[in-house]
Amino acid sequence: MTSELITDIAELTTNDDEHRRLRDAAMVIDEGRIAWIGPSRSAPDADISTSVHQSAVLPGWVDSHTHLVFAGDRSDEFEARMAGLPYTAGGIRTTVQATRAASDSALLANLARLRGEAEAGGTTFLETKTGYGLDVETERRSAELAAQVADVVTFLGAHVVPDAMAARDYLDLVTGPMLAAVRPWVSFIDVFCERGAFDGDQSREVLEAGIAAGLGVRVHGNQLGESGGVALAVEVGAMSVDHCNHLSDSDVAALADSTTVATVLPACDLSTRQPLAPARRLLDAGATIAIATNCNPGSSFTTSMQYCVATAVLQMNLTVEEAVFAATRGAARSLGRDTGPEAVGGLRVGGRADFQVLAAPSAAHIAYRPGVPLTRAVWRQGERVVARHATPVQEQDSL
Ligand code: NIG
């Protein structure tokens, strides 16, 4: 592999513990990793040199919550919601029907299309979940297909109880044969702990089965009400509890006192007209937060981390730096990937060269120019995977 100098970086977001942002910086990448970071003027030689002409460079987004294994469209449900109907968990069953009927190749094509869309928007590391199969064979093939496209796969057999099944029978299936069938492809277990899905005791049973099978824990909690999901997540040592729209003071205190990351999903909050998750309150209390898209056909059909970060700044009262950190290193932490040789979500010497170049001089433009696709180039493990010419911001740029 040839080494590459990326130079003339106006602002480099590293997420390093000491220097989160460097000005007028350069970076050398080699063998998929970062070999050097420092001021542009003292950059060493490399086999090739790429000027980014005073653009901002930041780590690739880490999208730590998506549901990409699905078929079908629920824009009718979305339109009805925008006309006043509430969001309920019931729509999940519509996607289950379509997913069960879809071929592997159709599911894989949809997965690859969405991953490509995410990557073009700067996402370099992505988690996805099963959860639209809800029978052993469709959950198994969902996990197997997801593992071909995503970096991390989560088992969400406990999404809702499928039609025509008793909850007790379904829990036995999820914690027994279904868990065994998906196990080779998944590293986390998840449960939708909510009215209309699984109550606290049922959720605990699912999570304990996953823990016994060696899986890490994630929880969908407190999305539609104070479901007890947050307290349960903290109690069982979950890596992440996601949604967090309805939090009591004790939920916030418990998160602040724990290693469980609170993952907020701003696009979902807007698309379901739920109150925005209290990200500011969580940060002020000392909790770690992550920002993710929750891309799925029901409650949040977007792959755009840029949109989520902009919304977190503009509507959840986060600073740009806080929101970018939450969508990169915070999300990596929720996946157990923010330290060690395979860490993602930050740029440091020896670490993975996963980064994006913006058509803008600073990360502030993500929220300053909301809705404008600013990612113009993306490197993943040292290889340029996206090079877009369409943005006429700096025409001299060779990217
Ligand atoms: O995270 N909340 C549960 N699961 C998804 C919604 C899935 C759907 O409505 O299809 C979510 O929002």
Image: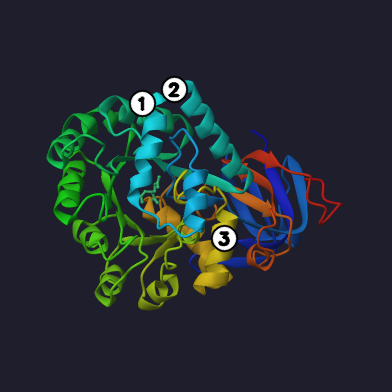
For the C terminus, give its image quadrant. Answer: top right
Q: Which residue is mark 3?
A: 14
- Calculate the distance from the C-alpha at mark 1 to the C-alpha at mark 2: 8 Å
Residue 295 seen: no
Q: Position of residue 236 (x, y in %)?
A: 20, 56
Q: Of residues 38 and 118, which is closer to you in this image?
A: 118
Q: Of residues 266 and 233, which is closer to you in this image?
A: 266
- Calculate the distance from the C-alpha at mark 3 to the C-alpha at mark 1: 37 Å
Q: Of residues 82 and 212, which is closer to you in this image?
A: 82
Q: Position of residue 172 (x, y in %)?
A: 14, 36
- Which secondary structure, mark 2? helix
Q: Which residue is mark 1?
A: 141
Q: Which residue is mark 2?
A: 104
Quarter of the rendering containing residue 194: bottom left
Q: Is residue 393 left or right of residue 23?
A: right
Residue 149 seen: yes
Q: Looking at the image, which residue is at 25% across and 61% down?
A: 227
Q: CB atoms at circles 1 and 2 under 8 Å apart?
A: yes
- Which secondary structure, mark 1? helix
